[in-house]
């Protein structure tokens, strides 16, 4: 079953973020953190659901796990970047896989950042988003 949860707030010009994460506690923690900072968040729990919803709804950012139940996050990112409609959407990989090789693979398939899940992951994610917004 693909889970899609979305907050519907009426803050104008609010950035929308898609979280693709199969672990509900992790996804909800990230979702609540982002929403508490004013972002509109949609969460899906499979790579294919992420690809599908990205085709139909415009997002400002995609936060992507690697270990998903259907296709891995590297493949999802490759497919996003190969689609001319979706290629410009920044992808940040947020994952338990913390090996340098995995980080390089993520960056090589088009992610703009690779954040290992640890006690500081949400803080690092928020800082990365903040830096992205100040450079645009």
Image (cartoon, rainbow, N blue to C red):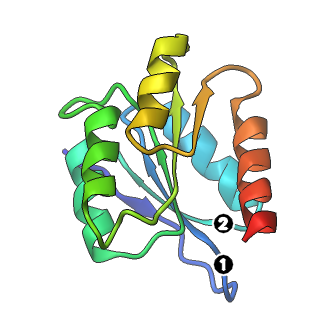
Q: At numbered mark 2, what does the secondary structure look like: helix, strand or loop?
A: loop
Q: At numbered mark 1, what does the secondary structure look like: helix, strand or loop?
A: loop
Counting labels gives 2
Q: Residue at x 78, y 38 (%)?
A: 123
Q: Which of these two is toward me, 29 or 98?
A: 98
Q: Quadrant of the N terminus?
A: top left
Q: Residues within 10 Å of mark 1 (few under 14, many from 20)?
A: few
Identify the mark nearer the N-term, 2 or 1: 1
Answer left or right for 45 relative to 42: left
Q: Is residue 89 visible?
A: yes
Residue 116's tag is none
Residue wearing tag 1 = 14
Residue wearing tag 2 = 39
Q: Residue at x 25, y 63 (%)?
A: 83
Task: Give residue 108's position: percent from left, percent from top.
Answer: 42, 34
Q: Which of these two is toward me, 60 or 21?
A: 60
Task: Give residue 71's position: percent from left, percent from top.
Answer: 20, 34
State the separation of the CA atoms marked 2 and 1: 6 Å
Answer left or right for 56 relative to 27: left
**With respect to residue 77, does 8 lie above or below?**
below
**With respect to residue 17, does 32 lie above or below?**
above
Task: Give residue 132's position: percent from left, percent from top.
Answer: 72, 59
Answer left or right for 48 relative to 33: left
**With respect to residue 52, does 64 lie above or below?**
above
Q: Quadrant of residue 134?
A: bottom right
Q: Residues within 10 Å of mark 2 (few under 14, many from 20)?
A: some
Q: Is residue 46 visible?
A: no
Label 2 with label 1: CB-CB less than 8 Å:
yes
Q: Residue at x 27, y 75 (%)?
A: 56
Task: Give residue 84's position: percent from left, percent from top.
Answer: 29, 69
């Amino acid at each position: 079953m693909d889970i899609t949860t979305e907050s519907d707030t009426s803050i104008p010009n609010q950035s929308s973020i898609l979280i693709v994460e199969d672990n509900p506690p992790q996804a909800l923690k990230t979702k609540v953190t982002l929403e508490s900072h004013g972002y509109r968040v949609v969460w899906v729990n499979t790579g294919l659901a992420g690809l599908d919803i990205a085709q139909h709804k415009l997002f400002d950012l995609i936060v992507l796990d690697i270990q998903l139940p259907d296709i891995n996050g590297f493949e999802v990112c490759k497919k996003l970047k190969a689609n001319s409609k979706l290629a410009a959407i920044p992808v940040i990989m947020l994952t338990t896989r913390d090996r340098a090789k995995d980080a390089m693979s993520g960056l090589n398939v088009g992610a703009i950042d690779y954040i290992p899940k640890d006690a500081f992951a949400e803080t690092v994610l928020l800082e990365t988003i903040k830096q992205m917004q100040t450079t645009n």
